Structures are given as structure tokens and as C-alpha cells.
Image (tube, coloured by chain):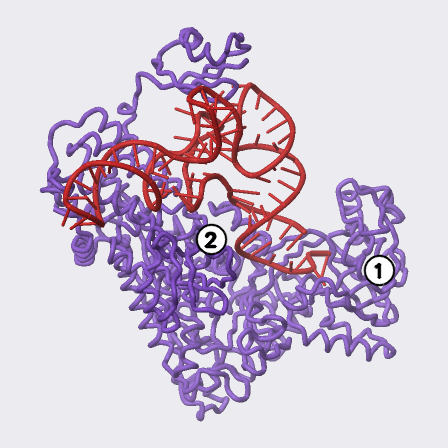
Chain colours: A purple, B red
Amino acid sequence: MKYDHKVIEARWQQFWREHKTFEAKNPGTEGADKPKYYVLDMFPYPSGAGLHVGHPLGYIASDIYARYKRHRGFNVLHPMGYDSFGLPAEQYAIQTGQHPAITTETNIARYREQLDKIGFSFDWSREVRTSDPAYYKWTQWIFTRLFRSWYNNDTDKAEDIRTLILKFEKDGNTGVNAVCDSDTRSFTAAEWNAFTDEEQQHILLKYRLTYLAETEVNWCPALGTVLANDEIVNGVSERGGHPVIRKKMTQWSMRITAYAQRLLDGLDRLDWPQPLKDAQTNWIGRSEGAEVTFKVKGSDAKIPVFTTRPDTIFGVSFMTLAPEHDLVSLITTPEQQQEVDAYIEATAKRSERDRMSDVKTISGVFTGAYAEHPFSGQPIPVWIGDYVLAGYGTGAVMAVPCGDQRDYDFAKHFGIPIPNIFEYADISEKAHSEKQGTVIANSDFLSGLSYEDATQEAIRKLEAIGAGKGRINYRLRDAVFSRQRYWGEPFPVYYVNGLPQMIGKEHLPVRLPEVEKYLPTETGEPPLGNAKTWAWDIENHKVVGNERIDHKTVFPLELNTMPGWAGSSWYFNRYMDAHNQSETASPETLQYWKDVDLYIGGSEHATGHLLYSRFWQKFQYDMKLVPVDEFAKKLINQGMILGTSAFVYRVKGTNTLVSANKKEELETEPIHADVSFVNASDELDVDAFKNWRPEFKDAEFVLEDGRYIVGREVEKMSKSKYNVVNPDDICEQYGADTLRLYEMFLGPIDQAKPWNTAGITGVHGFLKKLWKLYHSPLEGGQGGDFYVSDAPASAESLKTLHKTIKKVIEDIENFSFNTSVSSFMIAVNELSAQQCHSREILEPLVVIIAPYAPHIAEELWHKLGHHESVTFATFPEFEAKYLVESSKEYPVSFNGKMRFKLELPMDMSKEDMEKVVMAHEKTQEQLQGRTPKKIIIVPGKIINIVG
RNA sequence: GCCUCGGUGGCGGAAUUGGUAGACGCGCCGGAUUCAAAAUCCGGUUCUUUCGGGAGUGUGGGUUCGAUUCCCACCCGAGGUACCA
């Protein structure tokens, strides 16, 4: 019988579906007494292009691990779903009018079809889709919980907003240690109680974990939308090239900064790749220093600044405020007004990205105002400059040009003095920014102190005179949570007198309304502004027509939608109890599954999805909604699979194509050829290529040795480069098991590597060879009937089996899947050579290969006489006794270079070994009469002769 | 600039705590089988060589009996981040 992957794979995929083989068992059901193991993939956005061979790489790795854990007796949760809100479907809707829900549904169906063909062991009964109202109901609910919460620094966790109101009612806000907006004013209990309800609500917004705030955004008037930084190229929109301006908009924000320290601390406990942890650490950007308050001369205004170098406070020779800083308008003198206004206007026109990438241009304007040095009382000119960012620290810096290169450049540029406050530092060319070994000078009470001592002393003195205090600052900013888009979660929010009100849990979800157009409205409102039925009736608790808005019982609803990361920030918990209608997931299932044991996904999510998810998880933990405060214990990044593009070379100005090795002496231009026209020897199928596009119909081909050879280059896999390889085609031609093995065989899971279909025959051949091991040999090389023998296995075969078991267990546990594929090949090569047909060997062999190539494994397992799926067969134990050797072929080295090999018994003493080696003729040949200085013998390893 | 990862045959890659560099596979070369091809099987394949050997893991140094592996300096590539006070 021939190995027929098509029949075998279809059979077992159907078997798994019918027997619900991969459904995980929730607590209370049979099978949940096993230890749990949760293997998760980052769920995909279902794009219209479908999957290419790069996408399933991580899924295959996680699937192998999930299957391995089932063999090891775990109750495995291995779900899949779709991050199905997103821009492409909306973009398609704008162009064609087709509802994004339809586009999404179609794309999901295609994804599912493709995924099914690869034979994943997903538990599809738990599928989630972020765009499903039954799912986003809970995304909306978590949002309302964030709204109803504040962050208490004293207890270091989020609490219900009611505990804050109680504090306000009792003591005002002076004793409250909360994370809140920086412009929050203090008030007493009496004042609080005297505020109107509206005033109180405004104040509470400054404390809520999700809040409305004026945020600076990149606004593109022509497109009527806000653009992300990477959608802007050279100050204009990437799409259409329209101008982009900085604009303040009222938007929802997430107070993720409240969790900055905990997000940082939590990293220590996570088994995540170091580069990923580093990326999060840098993104959070903790820096220790001091806040120093400078009084403005002739004014009540005070300028707080954050500095990491309070030790250099006597080196301050000017201050710089961000142009957007609130104080600028207050302190600017009439003489400087015009210049300052012009500068602010010019700055507003530049996008943030533009402003930040242009590091070389130094610009700024003097405000005319002077601040007062907190210790010396000296006047300090106050400037504005766009190198100071409004959103970081206090939006103002004390400039110490002798110790900071940016301040130095600014001072040089504008002719501001650069006092030197360092002992032995040369600042004639550049600032002295080193801290180690620095000694402070010309600094009153700080003179003569080291960096460390001066820092402490400066903070102590600042606190003593009430001009500052030690402070920790984070680069991390609160995350804007509003998008001016249609295809996202609607906010469960309506407005009464401009104040946001949450819609109660029992009335959720608030479903996306229908709109005629998916573009912003003519008045510049988001797409939901086009909806005619988008108002909230507080009496009937439902969405009603806009015409009924009376601001008494019917109010307008929020027009923004949530960003892509909303739904993906908690989906991993939903899989635990995917159909629960009364909670995100029940406490029992949450307690059982707890967290993700292994999470596989791309490193590009380091500072987006993975940081936001950790934030939401910590919040839910504080609210006692989940039992653990980190959602994924271990994380593996999968590397990108690149394409191997193929090129033909057209001689300039002609329609003549020359073979790759004949192009050198000619002037040619490379043209992408579809990789499907190229065989394993880089040979082009000329006829197929001619029929590909009309322009090549009459092209002339200059061959070499009768063949047209293409040039090859590794590039990103993309349609435009004609190097996309579709997994369906591979499954059709070679089978899913071959695809799975080959993806793993390409190289380490976490590294980027090029795909080249040419190599796939190697693993396909391996599967055929494996198949033949279980069949009697037949003339012509094809396998005959199924055949295994019950005769005992040879010692050699047992050795092969057990070294493979050992290697594969080690490999799986180290996520080194490429090397275990090699081990399987070696094992099958050896067993074939040994003509092994023993059940004792071949039965365990099926089980160890099953996680990698599950279809062929099921087929062989059943042929071996089993009636249950191989899925739950116990993974064979490695037994060291089969690997014991009585002798070893020692490498004999001279000065570290291996020269010959020598077989010696393992139990030979060092002395005897030395005698045998020295007596050997090749040793004498190598030494040529010299006497060795030293002979190193490491039993079981090596012999090295020095001299 | 900073952070991180990487650099080994024609190609993808392997090498457990420092101990036989190039496993396994592709490609290539030769052979068997075949009318022929596909498929299958066998042998060879780092470079160099006067066929004894010699050199060799990005470059240059160091530690060591011994370095792809550890240390220092540098070069190149990929990814992330970017005036963060």
C-alpha cells in the first residue's frame, strides 16, 4: 500500500471532528481531574488574502506542544478564534459598500478552511470572535468597570470609585493618594459635599481608570480622521498625501500609567523572551530623579520640572517649556508675545513623529520671563522649545548645558552661558554627561560631592526648603482608547450635558448601529455619526432613533469606537468559559485554568497587545475578577517566514530574457517571476511563464545548457513579490503532515528564515520511508501490505528508539522542533537499515511522531490494532539502559586538532589509555620523535596530546 | 544614537556544562533500476592540496591542553525604539 496523504488526512480530520477529540474538559466534567495545560496562539485578524505558509508556523509549534502535553496526561486547552474587528474590512466597506460583518464572515470561513486542512488540534467549540456581540458585550462591560474604578496608591491597587467618593465626603481629596490627572485641584470634604453632582462627576473623571480627556492627535482634515504615527509619512498622510495637523480632541484614555510599576515588577516573574521583556521595560521607561519647582519672577506662577540629575542643579542656566505648556501664555512678556505665538503655531503644524525624528534642527524662543533658582535666587531665562515634550514629566526642563548634550546644543545655538559645575571635566566641545566618577564643583553645598552623594543631598535640601522632592517618572503614557472608526466595539456610553454615563451590565451589549456610509460625516464626526438609530433611552434601556433625543430621557450615544486592542486584551480568559452569558468566565473555570501556560506569537506585539493585556489582567485581578495577575506564564516568539523570490532578467530596452548566469555582461533589469514556475533546481518553466502575462507572450529566452535559470533573493512574503506560497497547495501536493514537519524543519522557531518549497521533498520522503517501515517490502520500492512483527527487537533498534525518545523529549521541552525532525529522520534511516519490523519499536515510534505528523500517526496507530485515537496514548518513557556503551571511539587530538580516532573500552583506566595511545603508530607519526609535554585524557570524551 | 538578536559549506541549518565543526535535509556529482521518465535505492559532496597533509565557524586580539561556545575591541545584517530631561 502506498502512502496516500489525501485519503489519510481527510479520514482523520473527519474522525477528530466527529469524536470531538480535542475538546478540553472544564471543571465538573469527566476528564477535568487531570492537571490542566493551556496552550494559546495569538489569534489572527482574518484578512482577505488568506493564510500563507508563514502564518501557521507558530500554530504548528503550539499544536505540537499541545499534543505532546495530551500524551503526557494533561487536560489541554488549545483554542482558536479571530481578532475580527479591524481596518481592512472597514476600508473595503468604504470602497464597495459591503458591510464589514459580511467581509469578516467570508474571510473567517476561508481561514477556517485553511486551518482545518493543516490538522490542528484546536478546540473549536470555544471559538471567540471579538466582533461577536456576545463577546464584545463583555469587552464593553470591562470598560464600564474601569470607568467605575480608581487607583489607590496606598493599597497599590484599583478600587471601586465608591471608596473614593466616601473619602471625598469624609476628608476631601488632600489625604487621598491616588493616580489622577496632574491638574487636579485640592478640596475639602465640605467643598466636595457642596459641589453639584455635575461638578463632582467632572472631578471623578480625573481619577477614573478610563476617562475622557483632551488629547493631542494627528488630525487629517481631508480624510476626516485621526492617524497613527506610522500612517504619516513626511508630515502628510500615507494614504493620499494630505496635510496632517496636531489637534486636541476629547477622547477616552486608559490610565495604564497607574500600573507602570507593577507592569515593570511583574516582568521578573514571567518566562518570556528577554528582548521582549526589555522592550516593555524600555517602553515603560522608569527614571528616578526629583521634581523641582521654580518660581517665576514677578508672578505667582511656578514651574515644576522633572530631572534625573538633581546633583547638577547649580549648573542650570535656562529653562525650557514645551510650546504647548499651559504656563506659556501666562508668563510670556508683551515684547516676546508675537515671536512666541508664531513659534507655537509652527510647532502645531508638525506631526509628533516629524518633530521627534528631526533631531538636528534646534529651535526655540525666549518667553521674556525669568525663573528663580531655588537655592541661589539667580534669575533663569525661560524659553520654549519643541525638543521638550508636553506629555513627558512636567513638560518643562531645567536645562543644564554642561551636563546634557541637548541642553548644550540649545545653549550653544542661542548663545546662552554654559557654566561648568564639574571638577576636571572638559566642556569646550561637548557636554559632560557621564555620572560615574563625576565630582561636583562650583555648587555651594554640593561642591566636592560625588554624583551619588550630591543627588541625595540635593533632594534632601530641596525637600527641606519645600522646593521639590524625589520622584520616579515613567515614559509610559496613558493610552488613547477612542478611534474614529466604524468597525470596532461601540462604547456603552451616552452623554448627559456632556458628561459620560455608563450603560448597565444588564443592558449590554450595545450593538453596532447600521450606517449608510462608513466614512466620517460631513461635519467631521466619526462614522457612527451617520447612524440614524443611535440614541439611548434611559427609561426603556434601549437604542432608539436619533430624532427622539430630548436630553431628558433620550440621550446621544458615543460616536467613537474602541481600538483594535480592546477585544484582544482579555480573550485568553474567555476561552476558559466561552459561552458564559452571565460573566466573562465563571470563577470555577477561571480558578481551574488560571492562566496561559504557553503563549506563542510574534514579537511585534511586545509593547501593544502584550502590555495592554497585562494591564487589563492586573486590573481584573484587583477587582477579583480573575485569580492571577499575569495572564501568560511562558511566551515564545515565532520568527517570520520570508519568501524566496525568483527573478528573470530582461535586457534593457528589449523583450529578451537572459538566464541568471548570462546577465553579467549585459545591462538587465530584474523582474519578479511567480515562484510556482520555478523547480527545485531554480529552473524556470518557460511556457508557464509566457502564459502568465501577455507582455511575456512573445519574449525571447536566452538559455544556459538548455535551461532558463532564475535569480533568487530572500524578501518578505508578499503578493507584489510573487513569492507567496499557500499552505493549501502544499497540503494538496504533499499533505499536512509534510507541511507541519517542513515548517518545523526550516530552523529554530524564534528566528526569521526563508521558505523555499524546493526542500520539502526531503521531509515528504521521510514520511514515505516511515510508512514503509510498517509495510512489507515489495518489488519496485513501494510498500506492500501492512506488516509488523511481534518478535523482540534487536538491541540496536532499541538503542535507536530510546535515543530518539530522549532527544525528542528534550527538544520539545526546549522548543527546538527543528532538531527533533532531524532525529526522526535519523531514527527512520537507522531502523530501515536495521530492517526493523518489531512492534516493540514501531508502536512507541508512532506516539513520539504523532505530535508532529498526527495524521499518518493515527493511520499507523489504527493499523497497529488500536481503536482509540493516538491522541491520548501515553508518551513512551526513555530508558537509559538501552544506551549503555561498552566502548567509545575516542578522537585523538594533537594540540587540540583531531588527527585520528581510536576505539577504546569505556572502563579502561587513564593510565592504560595513555599507554595504548602512545604506542599507536599514528601517534608516533604525528609526534615525529618529539616527547609530549602533556597528555590530557577525559574519559568518555577526548584524548589530547600536547607538544 | 540607544536596546535586542544574529553572522558556521552553494542553500536551510546542527554541534548538551568549552572536548571529533558541518548532524539532518535541499541542491549538485557519480552509479543502480528503467525502452525512457517519474519514483526508488547506493556512493560522494567545507575549501585547498604536490594526495603526505594544510586551512577553516564575520574581523583582530586574549584566556585555555583544547574555543562555533568564554572575555575584550571592531565590522556587517535584522528587529525594536527614538530629542524621555
Instruction: Identify the residue at image location x=39%, y=49%.
Output: A598
Residue placed at 47% from the left, 65% from the top? Answer: A565
Characterize the local packing of mark 1: few (<14), some (14-19) or many (20 or more) Cα atoms within 10 angstroms: some
Q: State the SS at label 1.
A: helix
Q: Nearer the viewer, mark 1 or mark 2?
A: 1
Dot 2, crowdedness within 10 Å: few (<14), some or many (≥20)?
many
Q: Which mark is residue A694?
A: none
Residue farthest along the bottom direction in this orientation: A547
Which residue is label 1 attached to? A412
Contact check, label 1 and label 2, Cβ < 8 Å: no
Query: Do badges 1 and 2 share one subunit?
Result: yes
Asked where in the image residue A509 lies, by quadrant, the reply is bottom left
Q: Is residue A735 visible?
A: yes
- The quadrant the C terminus of chain A occupies is top right
Q: Amino acid at mark 2?
A: Asp
What residue does disc 2 label? A629
Q: Chain of mark 2?
A: A
* Nearer the observer, B41 or A785: B41
A256 sits to left or right of A181: left
- Would you say residue A133 is visible in this rendering? no
Sequence-wise, the earlier of marks 1 and 2 is 1
Viewer-proximal residue, A923 or A879? A923
